[in-house]
Amino acid sequence: MIPARYAHIAFGFLLSGMMSFLVSGISTFLTLGPISGFFGAWTGAWLPSWAAAFPIVLVVAPIARRIVGALTIKE
């Protein structure tokens, strides 16, 4: 288990991993189609995407939270 103070980092790690996995899979499929070796190509696209997505999520998530906070009203 990890301390709660690192929850935002764990959340960013998991979110960036899942999102980059799905988006790179869709992009790889649209580019290559259902070819032999598709999963190897997908993995090859996903890992560098995740390496970029993780720090981006850590920077962009607080900005997105502030924008959403400004666009919503408390009930």
Image: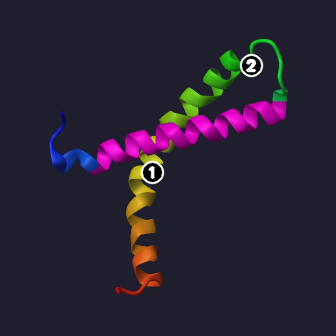
Alpha-carbon span between mark 1 and mark 2: 27 Å
Residue 15: in magenta span: yes
Decide if residue 13 is on the left or right side of residue 5: right
Stretch of the chain drawn in magenta: 8-31
Q: Residue at x 35, y 85 (%)?
A: 74
Q: Say which mark, if any, is on residue 2.
A: none
Do tag 1 and tag 2 residues touch (Cβ < 8 Å)? no
Residue 73 position in % (x across, y down): 40, 87
Where 63 sits versus 16, above or below? Answer: below
- Mark nearest the camera among 1 and 2 is 2
Residue 21 position in % (x across, y down): 58, 35
Q: Secondary structure at mark 1?
A: helix
Q: Quadrant of residue 23?
A: top right
Q: Amino acid at mark 2?
A: Phe
- Going from the N terminus, do you reach mark 1 or mark 2 first? 2
Q: Quadrant of residue 59?
A: bottom left
| Label 2 CA crowd tier, 10 Å (few <14, some 14–19, many 20+) | some
| Closer to us: 18 or 63 | 18
| Label 1 CA crowd tier, 10 Å (few <14, some 14–19, many 20+) | some
Q: Quadrant of the C terminus?
A: bottom left
Disc 2 designates what residue? 38
Residue 1 position in % (x across, y down): 18, 33
Q: Secondary structure at mark 2?
A: helix
The main secondary structure of the magenta stretch is helix
Q: Quadrant of residue 29?
A: top right
Where 68 sits versus 57, above or below? Answer: below
Disc 1 designates what residue? 57
Residue 17: in magenta span: yes
Extreme residue toward the top, this view? 36
Count of number-bearing discs:
2
Q: Residue at x 48, y 43 (%)?
A: 16
